[in-house]
Image (cartoon, rainbow, N blue to C red):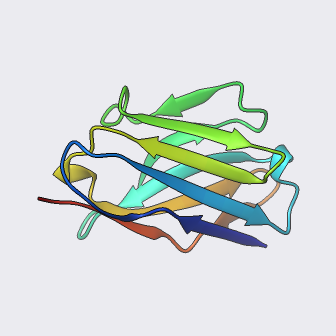
Amino acid sequence: VQLVESGGGLVQPGGSLRLSCAASGFTFSSYAMSWYRQAPGKERELVAAIISDGGSTNYADSVKGRFTISRDNAKNTVYLQMNSLKPEDTAVYYCKAFGLRVYWGQGTQVTVSS
């Protein structure tokens, strides 16, 4: 089983990034997917989640209206579009698959700084 995140990097405040998480080794379309983040010295927190067929999503209040989670079950990939980024969005972002079992990716760093 693998979850491989990509798309992180350094971006200026107000900018955008699109994270991807490519899954393999399990039945992706049967799993809900989510994005978490962990900033230095803080606990890991849920950012956004999407159910297995993509029909429902939910977001942390801190990112509502700025971030969008989506998935492509044909490509076994979940995405996180992040717009209007703020310095407080700086963190390592992880994807998580949850269903019969729980799987985590290794994380990708997002740094929002001028």
Kindly tell me whether residue 6 is visible in this rendering: yes
Quarter of the figure with residue 76: bottom right
Image position, residue 74 (x, y; %)? 84, 46
- Relative to 55, 113 lies left or right: left
Kindly tell me whether residue 44 is visible in this rendering: no
Q: Split into 4 quadrants, where in the image is the N terminus?
A: bottom right
- Relative to 69, 39 lies left or right: left
Image position, residue 70 (x, y; %)? 62, 38
Frontmost residue, 47 versus 86: 86
Q: Split into 4 quadrants, where in the image is the C terminus?
A: bottom left
Quarter of the figure with residue 72: top right
Rendered position, 3 above or below 63: below
Rendered position, 45 above or below 40: above
Frontmost residue, 7 versus 24: 7
Rendered position, 54 above or below 100: above
- Relative to 19, 96 lies left or right: right
Image position, residue 82 (x, y; %)? 40, 43
- Relative to 62, 53 lies left or right: right
- Residue at 70% x, 35% y is 51
Count of labels shown?
0
Q: Residue furthest left?
A: 114
- Residue at 78% x, 47% y is 31
Frontmost residue, 10 versus 37: 10
Image position, residue 60 (x, y; %)? 40, 36
